[in-house]
Image (cartoon, rainbow, N blue to C red):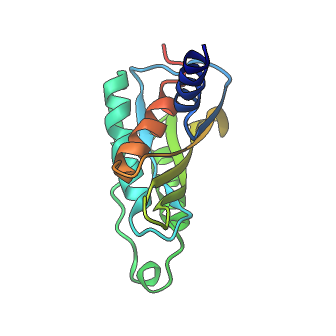
Amino acid sequence: MQRLMLFVMMVIFLCAGCSTINQSAREAVPLGEEWALLPFVNNTETPYAAERAESITAALLYARGVQRIEVAQLEPSAEEQLIPDRGAKRYQEALEAARKRGIHYAVVGTVTEWRYKVGLDGEPVVGVTLQVLHLPEGTVLWSGSGSKSGWSRDAASAVAQQVLESLISGIQVR
């Protein structure tokens, strides 16, 4: 009986994991509309974490059924390269460009953590926030935040994909 109880406790511990996902939704977003994937803001010390998260997000949105995604292709200016702004200026430029093009829906994000924990295990840790915006009205249709730490043999990108997949699966689409 004690072994069974120990086994059940271990299963519960493993299933719980070290992840947190919070989401809110207002209304469903149409899949057939053109979406804009705006540059993510990188609030980490890891170079190119935002670009990595953007790439995974685009792939997951296509897999979810979004048919047309306009991905912002903005190069950092010479000023940004000298004094990085973590992507905030590129985000604003892409937001204005999407509005001018008449795109109604945009996915924006912030990478809050993308690293490996220090120590023998070196576990990957990823934290991301996402929002779906209705650009004409300037409203947030959906918002989600997630974080997860993986096992010592996991890649940070694999953990990020799991977090982003959990978040994107919460977006109500029609």
Q: Residue furthest toward the bottom?
A: 82
| Residue 150, percent from left and from top | 45, 46
Q: Nearer the viewer, residue 98 or 114?
A: 114
Residue positioned 39% across, 83% down in the render? 78
Question: Count of labels shown?
Answer: 0
| Residue 31, percent from left and from top | 42, 20
Q: Decide if residue 17 is on the left or right side of residue 165.
A: right
Q: Nearer the viewer, residue 167 or 93?
A: 167
| Residue 116, percent from left and from top | 45, 61
Residue positioned 54% across, 59% down in the render? 92
| Residue 82, percent from left and from top | 44, 86
Residue 138 appearing in the image: yes
Q: Quadrant of the N terminus?
A: top right
Residue positioned 57% across, 18% down in the render? 28
Q: Decide if residue 72 is on the left or right side of residue 25.
A: left
Q: Is residue 69 positioned above or below 117 on the image?
A: above
Q: Nearer the viewer, residue 146 or 140?
A: 146
Residue 67 appearing in the image: no
Residue positioned 42% across, 34% down in the render? 35
Q: Nearer the viewer, residue 22 or 132?
A: 22
